[in-house]
Image (cartoon, rainbow, N blue to C red):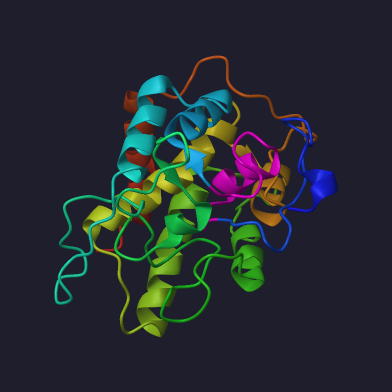
Amino acid sequence: MSPENRHLPKGEYHRGDGDDLRSPCPVINSLANHGYIARNGRNVTANELKVALEQIGLGFDTATALVKISFQAHVDPPADKPRDTSNFGMRDTDQVNDDGDAVINLNQLGRPHAIEHDVSITRQDRALGDCINLNTDLYQQFLQSSEDGVSFTIADLGKHRKKRFEEQKRDNPTIDLDKRMHYIACAEVGAIACVFGKGPLYHVPKEYIEAIFGEERLPFKEGWKPRWIKVFLPEAGAMVLGISYYAWPF
């Protein structure tokens, strides 16, 4: 990050510079772009990420679970069983800051054989291209998946996930998405619906999607505010099942 942008106030949006690290997740990248976690994407602590996730509407149990999983030390699985690993950890062993706190760099969220998976909504499969940065063609395809062109429903999100699976199964002979990773993929778009959806049916306005995915920015300008009632695990779990109902590809 350039020196003049290093001390921007928390909450102010600034897109990461060329030497800043970012992840495959647009929401996590948005947290960095707003300064809720380290703007340069380096040495993010577990507590820093947990607090940031709670600030945008996740309950303490949901945020804690996500952070705990992510901050485990990564275990490389046997070469012949790429998904046969005991955890989804993304940290290197003994990766800590000067104070001895466990830390992670945002690009580590894209390391293979962890949480990162094929069949992303807006990222290409690892075997076919860049699995970290936004693919503009996939992004435009995603924007067009809203049935009414105004907002994204649970059905829209789930059906588009299924469509992406069918496309990648056709195009990627080494596709890596088992049932366990399918539910993780559904949880990712489910989190978008829970945190940014409006009303009892969780409709996500198209302009929110454009801000989050297109600019990696929290949609404050579009009128979004974090929920008063946080997203706790039971609600998150129900949302995963709702998305999976429309997205199930097996």
Task: Name the residue furthest front.
Answer: 98
**Can residue 58 be seen from the camera position used here?**
yes
Q: Main secondary structure of the magenta part?
A: loop
The residue closer to the viewer here, 221 or 169, is 221
Task: Name the residue furthest right.
Answer: 4
Left or right, 220 with reference to 170: right
Please name the residue shown 35% across and 42% down the image. Answer: 71
Residue 117 found in image quarter: bottom left
Left or right, 36 with reference to 158: right
Q: Tell me, yes or no, whether the highlighted magenta stretch contains residue 38.
A: yes
Left or right, 80 with reference to 192: left
Q: Position of residue 239 (x, y in %)?
A: 39, 36
Residue 247 found in image quarter: bottom left
In the image, residue 24 sits, relative to residue 81, either above or below, namely above
In the image, residue 67 sits, relative to residue 159, either above or below, namely above
Left or right, 153 with reference to 5: left
Q: Position of residue 45 (x, y in %)?
A: 47, 36
Q: Position of residue 17 (x, y in %)?
A: 74, 58
Q: Which residues are magenta?
A: 23-42
Quadrant containing the C terminus in the rendered view: bottom left
